[in-house]
């Protein structure tokens, strides 16, 4: 979900989900003549993270490349 924390599998870089990318598929006209533009999720997730130069980076990843992270960690809450 938006604003959840994730990391790329095999990496320790924490990233925050910004958006699930969708694409417009072929439009459909209903029986009432209303044009619709359905959207379909294409498997890409845009994530925000801070690089070593303290710059905000927004980058797309395939959802299958990501794993969820609980943030802040439970140990950080205790301190």
Image (spheres, rainbow, N blue to C red):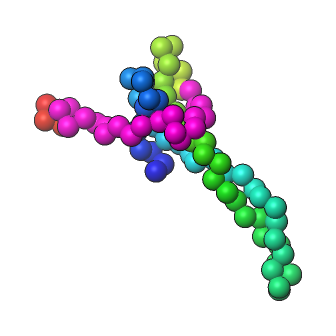
Tell me, yes or no, if residue 18 can be seen here: yes
Is residue 73 on the magenta stretch?
yes
Residue toward you, 7 or 3: 7
- Up-down relation of residue 58 to residue 12 (above or below): below
Residue 65 picture location, percent across and down: 51, 34
- Up-down relation of residue 8 to residue 51 (above or below): below
Which residue corresponds to the image point at 53% horizontal and 21% vertical from the top-left? Answer: 55
Q: Is residue 69 left or right of residue 57?
A: left
Residue 6 picture location, percent across and down: 42, 36
Residue 26 picture location, percent across and down: 81, 61
Q: Residue furthest bottom?
A: 32
Residue 28 picture location, percent across and down: 81, 71
Q: Is residue 58 left or right of residue 79?
A: right
In what quadrant of the picture does the C terminus appear?
top left
Residue toward you, 18 or 27: 27
Tell me, yes or no, if residue 15 can be seen here: no
Q: Residue furthest right?
A: 33
Q: Which residues are magenta?
A: 57-76
Q: Residue furthest top?
A: 53
- Up-down relation of residue 76 to residue 22 (above or below): above
Which residue corresponds to the image point at 42% horizontal and 23% vertical from the top-left? Answer: 11
- Up-down relation of residue 29 to residue 14 (above or below): below
Query: How many numbered discs?
Result: 0
Is residue 23 on the magenta stretch?
no
Which residue corresponds to the image point at 75% horizontal and 56% vertical from the top-left? Answer: 24
Residue toward you, 11 or 49: 11
Q: Residue furthest left?
A: 78
Which residue corresponds to the image point at 77% horizontal and 58% vertical from the top-left? Answer: 25
């Amino acid at each position: 979900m938006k604003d959840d924390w994730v990391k790329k599998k095999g990496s320790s870089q924490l990233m925050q989900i910004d958006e699930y990318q969708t694409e417009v598929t072929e439009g459909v006209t209903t029986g009432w003549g209303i044009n619709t533009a359905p959207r379909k999720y294409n498997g890409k997730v845009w994530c925000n993270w801070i690089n070593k130069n303290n710059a905000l980076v927004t980058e797309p990843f395939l959802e299958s490349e990501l794993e969820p992270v609980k943030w802040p960690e439970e140990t950080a809450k205790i301190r």
